[in-house]
Image: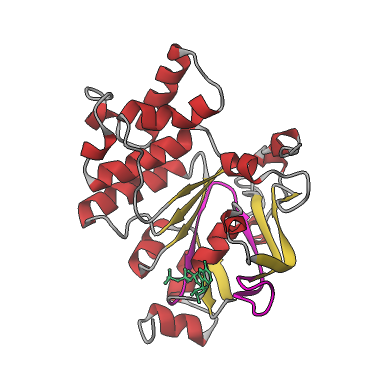
């Protein structure tokens, strides 16, 4: 029997530990707002695609705070998507892939511990892909899908959840009169927002986004970026992006990777105005990519 994520992994953000980054913030302004909490702790993580013969990720450590957008940037092949996919154990699907060192904790739980089921984990850690991938079903059924899988049958509950999720994905006004039309008839940008609605319908805590705008035009991109700004109030977002402009517009924190190593992790404003490493500076200024 497969054990599930213990005590629905008690994904109560308020119980998580204060992050390193936010401890600093709290020190500089002690009497103001409550410090954000760490939701994801990546601790000395090394990862291999070839049964440990070589490491694609090398001893990565970083804490990702709640209700913020954290961007992973770096040149092609540096391991951004690999790390993102480690966070909901998508790499488990690759037979020869393995963690060779370290661990990932989500709200204090080691996600590779025996009592954590990957399917259950992915309910809490949703994912949006570069290529939007709605099912060839109605708009309504796309959004209701995850809840139906979880056994929800009540029409009223499903209807309310679909409306709430479509509103959350800033799509309701555009589709409310055609909920039973095929989702594949929507524009690319609408399909991507539908995928976001489908993800948030099951109320994850974390949303991973792997270049969510790279297949979208500038107007659709702007809508998704605007949406991320809203979503961060409720969710913790981790995004992989190739676009420096996008990272600087939408993220609170940025991690720069190079050849499988984390070179620098800081507030986005610092990374883009005063990076601590010459490699970061060279990358963001376009000297290599
Ligand atoms: N399924 C896989 N099997 C084996 N190697 C892989 C697999 N996926 C990625 N890799 C390799 O791992 C390294 C990191 O790839 P990854 O896709 O994580 O990089 P990335 O920084 O996201 O790149 P990009 O920006 O081009 O998407 C690359 O050398 C890539 O070829």
Q: In the rendered view, does 12 fall on the left or right side of 78?
A: right
Q: Position of residue 3 (x, y in %)?
A: 75, 38
Q: Is residue 254 visible?
A: no
Query: Foreground residue, 187 or 39?
Result: 187
Q: Which residues are magenta?
A: 48-75
Q: Position of residue 142 (x, y in %)?
A: 38, 32
Query: Foreground residue, 95 or 194?
Result: 95
Which residue appears at 71% of the width and 39% of the height? 5
Query: Foreground residue, 228 or 115?
Result: 115
Image quarter of the C terminus: bottom left
Which residue appears at 57% of the width and 64% of the height? 83
Q: In the rendered view, does 49 fall on the left or right side of 173?
A: right
Q: Quadrant of residue 117?
A: top right
Query: Foreground residue, 38 or 211?
Result: 211
In the image, is residue 268 above or below residue 144? below
For residue 70: magenta? yes
Q: Quadrant of residue 87?
A: bottom right
């Amino acid at each position: 029997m497969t054990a599930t994520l213990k005590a629905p992994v008690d994904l109560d953000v308020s119980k998580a530990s204060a992050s390193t980054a936010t401890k600093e913030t709290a020190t500089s302004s002690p009497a103001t707002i409550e410090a954000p909490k760490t939701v994801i702790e990546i601790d000395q993580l090394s990862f291999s695609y070839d049964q440990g013969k070589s490491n694609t990720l090398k001893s990565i450590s970083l804490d990702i705070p709640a209700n913020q957008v954290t961007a992973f940037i770096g040149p092609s092949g540096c391991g951004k998507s690999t790390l993102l996919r480690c966070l909901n154990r998508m790499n488990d699907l690759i037979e020869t892939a393995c963690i060779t060192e370290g661990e990932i904790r989500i709200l204090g739980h080691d996600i590779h511990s025996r009592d954590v089921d990957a399917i259950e984990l992915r309910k809490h850690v949703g994912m949006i892909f570069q290529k939007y991938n709605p099912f060839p079903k109605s708009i309504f059924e796309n959004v209701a899908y995850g809840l139906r899988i979880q056994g929800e049958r009540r029409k009223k509950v499903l209807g309310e959840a679909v409306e709430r999720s479509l509103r959350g994905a800033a799509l309701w006004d555009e589709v409310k009169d055609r909920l039973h039309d095929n989702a594949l008839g929507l524009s690319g940008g609408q399909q991507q927002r539908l995928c976001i609605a489908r993800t948030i319908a099951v109320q994850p805590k974390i949303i991973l986004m792997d270049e969510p705008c790279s297949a979208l035009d500038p107007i659709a991109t702007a809508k998704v970026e605007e949406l991320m700004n809203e979503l961060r109030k409720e969710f913790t977002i981790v995004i992989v992006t190739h676009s420096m402009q996008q990272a600087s517009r939408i993220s609170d924190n940025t991690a720069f990777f190079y050849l499988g190593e984390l070179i620098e992790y800081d507030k986005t404003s610092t990374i883009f105005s005063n990076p601590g490493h010459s490699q970061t500076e060279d990358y963001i200024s376009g000297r290599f990519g």
